[in-house]
Amino acid sequence: MKNYLTGYNRNNNAFDLIDNAFDDFFRPLFYDAKLDSMKTDIRETKDSYILDVEMPGFDKEDISLEVEDGYLTIRADKKEKEEDDKAEHRYVRKERSVSCQRSYYIGDTEEDTIKAKYDKGVLTVTLPKKEEKKPEAKRNITIE
């Protein structure tokens, strides 16, 4: 996708019009641009799952985590600065995200012991696995 500061194509020639028509042709049908702002790597260890979520530009105070119905939801909301009416500039276009959200299914984890750490734009969430309960062998079955 082409971005022009003034919001229109300066050349305005036919080739640019055709080019612009196919800019998003190969983008997935249900593409969600918000997912680009929270790219996630998921690792598994013997005892836990570890999510590394990219969240550059946010402060620790901007981020919240919530667990509900087996889903972990990570939200980040950055408060926008109030613009001064007397400012010498105005925005022509604003693209920097001020809020984003993503949910992950965490069904087989210990929800009460989830830990999170935020460092240098990456949120690391550790999800301990539930201990597998081995079924006890049933003894003393009566034979009729």
Image: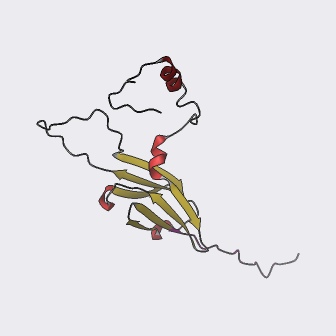
User: What residue appears at the point 31 percent right and 59 percent down from the top-left corner?
Assistant: 59
User: What residue appears at the point 37 percent right and 57 percent down from the top-left corner?
Assistant: 64
Is 32 located above or below residue 4 in the figure?
Answer: below
- Residue 121 horizontal/vertical position (percent): 39, 60
> Would you identify the image quadrant in which residue 10 lies?
top left
- Residue 91 horizontal/vertical position (percent): 25, 35
Q: Is residue 37 visible?
A: yes
Segment colored magenta:
127-141
Q: Please state if 116 lies on the left or on the right of 45 as rendered.
A: left
- Residue 9 horizontal/vertical position (percent): 40, 24
Q: Residue farthest to the bottom?
A: 140
In-front residue for pair 15/105 = 15
Q: Residue farthest to the right?
A: 144
Is 28 located above or below residue 107 in the figure?
Answer: above
In-front residue for pair 87/45 = 87
Instruction: Find out whether residue 2 is within the magenta segment.
Output: no
Q: Residue farthest to the top?
A: 14
Q: Please state if 138 lies on the left or on the right of 63 as rendered.
A: right
Instruction: Find out whether residue 130 is within the magenta segment.
Output: yes
Q: Quadrant of the C terminus?
A: bottom right
**Would you say the magenta stretch is mainly helix, strand or loop?**
loop
User: What residue appears at the point 46 percent right and 52 percent down from the top-left corner?
Assistant: 38
Q: Please state if 122 lies on the left or on the right of 79 as rendered.
A: right
User: What residue appears at the point 53 percent right and 21 percent down from the top-left corner?
Assistant: 18
Q: Is residue 70 visible?
A: no
- Residue 105 horizontal/vertical position (percent): 55, 55
Is 110 located above or below residue 93 in the figure?
Answer: below
Coloring scheme used:
secondary structure
In-front residue for pair 55/108 = 55
